[in-house]
Image (spheres, rainbow, N blue to C red):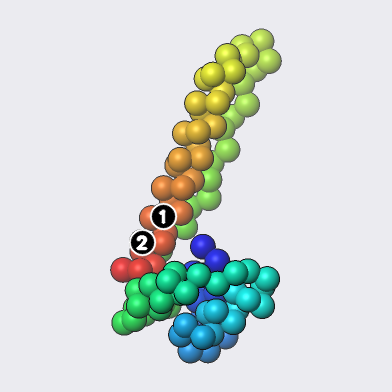
Amino acid sequence: MEYVYAALLLHRLGKKIDEENISSVIRAAGGEVDEVRVKALVAALQGINIDEAIKSASFTAPVAAAPQPAAQEAPKEKVEAKKEEVEEKKEEEALAGLSALFG
């Protein structure tokens, strides 16, 4: 995810999105650079209009689940299952946003 953020930052600042600049941003933030990921990202962004991708991306805020009354406590297993469902849904929404970014 940090690679995409680096590319978005470079785009916002009007800098060229290339391997060297993305690597520099990651290092400046204290991260370790995976050259394979950098190359893959740069290749994936070739020919992509980032402004249009951002405009067409649908951003939705996660909806918080309503708290259950104290008298109807759910078993721990149900609570854990619900948490997993919420996390999976958040991941799916994040991936949908990324897929829109990459066309």
Query: Three-letter amino acid code at disc 2?
Result: Ser
Residue 10 in the image, given as x and y percentages of width and height: 54, 82
Mark 1, residue position = 95
Residue 28 visible to the viewer: yes
Query: Three-letter amino acid code at disc 1?
Result: Leu
Q: Where 95 sits versus 90, above or below?
A: below
Residue 90 in the image, given as x and y percentages of width and height: 48, 46
- What is the crowding at mark 1: few (fewer than 14 residues within 10 Å), some, or many (at least 20)? few
Residue sitting at x 38%, y 55%: 96
Q: Do the CB atoms of the residues marked 1 and 2 lie less than 8 Å apart?
A: yes
Q: Nearer the viewer, residue 98 or 58?
A: 98
Residue 85 in the image, given as x and y percentages of width and height: 47, 34
Q: Where, by quadrant of the figure, is residue 6 drawn?
A: bottom right
Mark 2, residue position = 99
Q: Where 88 sits versus 37, above or below?
A: above
Residue 56 visible to the viewer: no
